Image (tube, grey):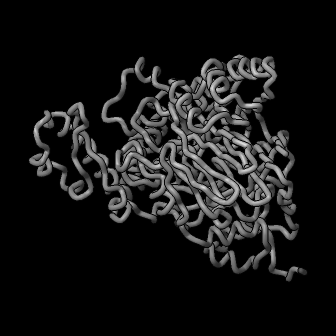
Amino acid sequence: MELNTNQYYLKLNVAIESLVDKWYAWSYLISPATAAMNIKDRHLKIMESYIKNPSVHAAAVENPKMLGGPFIDYKGKRVDEIKSLYDETLEKRADLLELREAILELNEILRKEAKGYSLNLLYDKVPEILKGYVELYYDLNNNPNFRFFENLLYKSKYYDESAQTISLQLVEADDSRSFVLSTPRLDDDNLVHLDIPFKSNVIDELFKMKETPNDYNKIKQLLGVSDNQEELFKQFFTKEAPPKFTKYSGSGVRTRYFGHACVLVETNEISILVDPVISYDGYEKEVNRYTISDLPDQIDYVLITHNHQDHILLETLLQLRHRIKHIIVPSSGKGNLQDPSIKMMFNAIGFNNVIQLDEMQNIEMHGCTITGLPFLGEHSDIDIRSKLCYHIALHNDLKILFTADSCNIEPKIYQKIHEVLGDADVLFLGMECDGAPLSWLYGPLMPEKLDREKDLSRRLAGCDSKQGMSLVDIFKPRNVFVYAMGLEPWLEFISSIKYTDESRPIVESNQLVAECIERGIDAERLFGEKTIEYK
């Protein structure tokens, strides 16, 4: 088809960042209650620190040991803009900040007054703004707690789509961006900021243009690009057609590793994408990688293992939304603050094809059975249910096990699973065995700061070599792939991980790979890209 003068493709290195009040959006900034806690105890706290001591932040960002810390990456500059964002947040998010105070107040009421007697009378003492949104309860040890009717919160003033915007930019060769949990995205000559909520289908129309050309003027108008943004916006488009995806047509199974925990499983009938985190193309790269051009036009199932920002990457998922037929997610703890519903979050931002799965529950389809498995560790011993490993049984008898960041703390659980499902042919195993302390991710949700020693003992950590080899012993795979390590350079702005040869996860994974090979098991720590075909 010959293109007319207005028909263009979107360049393959155009990235979208979904933002909440100029901060990089992740699932805990979508759900209202967790957003309230993070805005107060992460965003405002970091900005206040920067306003007071910008030079401290500038020095910390330059220190590799501080990577991933609460430090804004603007080299000690742009303090006035951070102060303006701070003031705007106080004004625009007053309702959410009030919600946060009410949550802490209710927690204190329960701590002081719920002593094992009926909770009926305490409903009168629930802070007014929480009335109608919470249920009070005891666990079986008579510890009091509360849960949200989370769907009602999404339908209240506490879910405000006006906080949502997107920015577009060209990703260049070094893949570098500031760490997402600590640096807001201020206006920049290289960014196009647009007031578009995440659920808008104009996002789908834009990213379809990475495959199919469309009218430039039409998409510019749909996005509401202003005249002073157009000079940069024009640079996002090209007449050059992208590479065509070659669908797998063999009689076996093809798996492709895209980096971190992202793996594409294909047969000639079905495609399954696990934990989508996709890099960009269209520029010189030191590390080979698969990109969006290596994905099918239609993805039958996307599997989400757990609710962390490097496994639910909205930047990738929004670009792929128009291609995804179904998303499978773990079910949550039904309203607990620390465990917001992944399904409700996805529904709120325009994904209407979400299926919840529980442990040992499966979904059968033509040519494949997907089973959710228990997922231990990685969540700092907090009561979080929204986490699953996945067992994929292809009907040509190939069985693939994705364990993501789970930690084999109690092997007997996986022995029981093996009694049900048997051996696995392929094991994908996460081995980020150091992990950040509890407070790094969950600190803003805690009513009281945890003692440092306790905090450091409760890590967001996966398997070490001993725990990993125990899984190998149980499932007897013929292929073992260490993945989900955050090794790829395009993951650093999400994971803040930068290893050396002496880093414990590298040492432990080297040991596991060596032991597997010594036993005659094909093993490798994955990096960049990898294709494996099973006949």
Going by the image, does 411 lie left or right of 423? left
Q: Quadrant of the N terminus?
A: bottom right
Residue 299 in view (yes/no):
yes
Task: Give the residue displayed 62% in from the left and 43% down from the top.
Answer: 391
Disc count in the image? 0
User: In the image shown, does 223 or 313 lie closer to the viewer?
Assistant: 313
Q: Residue furthest right?
A: 2
Q: In which quarter of the image is the C terminus?
A: top right
Looking at the picture, how far across and down is residue 482, in whole percent? 71, 31
Q: As drawn, is 277 to the left or to the right of 309?
A: right
135 up-or-down from 483: above or below: below
Q: For the point 83% across and 60% down, which residue is it? A: 247
| Residue 383 on image: x %, y % | 39, 36
Residue 327 position, x and y percent, is: 58, 57
Looking at the rendering, which quadrant does residue 204 occupy?
A: bottom right
- The residue lying at 84 percent from left, 51 percent from top is 283
**Which sits in the foreground, 459 or 329?**
329
Please identify the quarter of the rendering in which residue 94 is found: bottom left
Q: Residue at x 46, y 55 (%)?
A: 30
* Residue in the foreground of this view, choosing between 214 and 227: 214
Residue 367 position (above or below residue 457): below
In which image quadrant can residue 118 be found?
A: top left
**Relative horizontal placement of residue 260, taking residue 434 as reference (left or right):** right
- Residue 192 visible in the current orientation: no
Give the vertical position of 514 relative to 347 (above or below): above
Comparing 438 with 302, the one in front is: 302
Q: Is residue 104 left or right of residue 331?
A: left
